[in-house]
Image: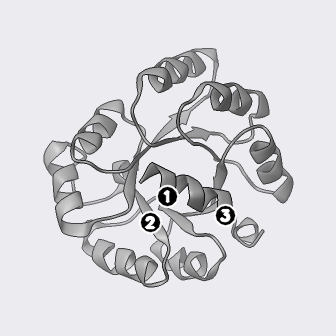
Amino acid sequence: MNHEFTETLERSPVIAAVFESSDLDEAIESPCEVIFLLSGSICELHDLIDKVHEKGKKLYIHIDLLEGVANDRSGIQFIKNNFSPDGIITTKATVARHAKEQGMFVIQRFFVLDSKSFENAYKTIKSSDVDAIEILPGILPEIISQISQSAKMPVIAGGLIRSKKNAVDSLAMGAMAVSTSCKKIWNM
């Protein structure tokens, strides 16, 4: 599955990050092949996943931000068995581990805000078996470069990607893709 994800990002390195389900239609109609759902309710999940899959696109759910289900072992198993998203996104190592145990595709997000958070992220990445990582904010070229060089999984730059230059710079520094809620970049 990781190989398919990598190929998809190579074809389409801009990921539509959707905060409001009302923006999903625009993301689906964009050239982006991957969509990150960064909010929502378990009540609307079937419809959202079906809508995305009907267009042949991939949907990854930020499970930490999904209303109506706990992000524990049982909640993850429930999501997998009842909704079958392409994968999940989480900031929590425990959630990532539980999802991997369930055979799910996992993208772990790291907020790199200072030297300590960089060191913690770096240590976690080295021992992690997640399928991809996302570094936020994605406009830190030196950090993106250092992590991309040592990570054994695809690196996604996300957060504060607000211009084509931000996206191109992050990709040039080694990110495989960028995730952004900036709609003008979805059509880059």
Residue visible at 57% across and 42% down in the picture: 154
Q: Position of residue 33 (x, y in %)?
A: 58, 69
How is colour applied across the structure in the image? one colour
Is the residue under label 3 in contact with that under label 1 (CB below 8 Å)?
no
Q: Residue 59, which numbered label? A: 2
What is the crowding at mark 3: few (fewer than 14 residues within 10 Å), some, or many (at least 20)? Answer: few
Mark 3–mark 2 Cα distance, whole angstroms, equals 16 Å
Q: Quadrant of the C terminus?
A: bottom right
Q: Position of residue 167 (x, y in %)?
A: 77, 52
Disc 3 on helix, strand or loop?
Answer: helix
- Asked whether the viewer can see residue 178, the reply is yes
Mark 1–mark 3 Cα distance, whole angstroms, equals 11 Å
Q: Position of residue 84 (x, y in %)?
A: 28, 65
Mark nearer the N terminus (1 vs 2): 1
Mark 1–mark 2 Cα distance, whole angstroms, equals 14 Å
What kind of residue is marked 1?
Glu
What is the crowding at mark 1: few (fewer than 14 residues within 10 Å), some, or many (at least 20)? Answer: few
Q: Quadrant of the N terminus?
A: bottom left
Q: Which of these two is toward me, 174 or 29?
A: 174
Q: Which residue is mark 3?
A: 11
- Above or below residue 62? Residue 109 is above
Residue visible at 23% across and 59% down in the picture: 80
Q: Nearer the viewer, mark 3 or mark 2?
A: 3
What kind of residue is marked 2?
Leu
Q: Position of residue 173 (x, y in %)?
A: 78, 37
Q: Residue 4, which numbered label? A: 1
Residue visible at 36% across and 80% down in the picture: 50
Q: Which of these two is toward me, 151 or 4?
A: 4
Disc 2 on helix, strand or loop?
Answer: strand
Residue visible at 77% across and 27% down in the picture: 142
Mark nearer the N terminus (1 vs 3): 1
- Above or below residue 85? Residue 96 is above
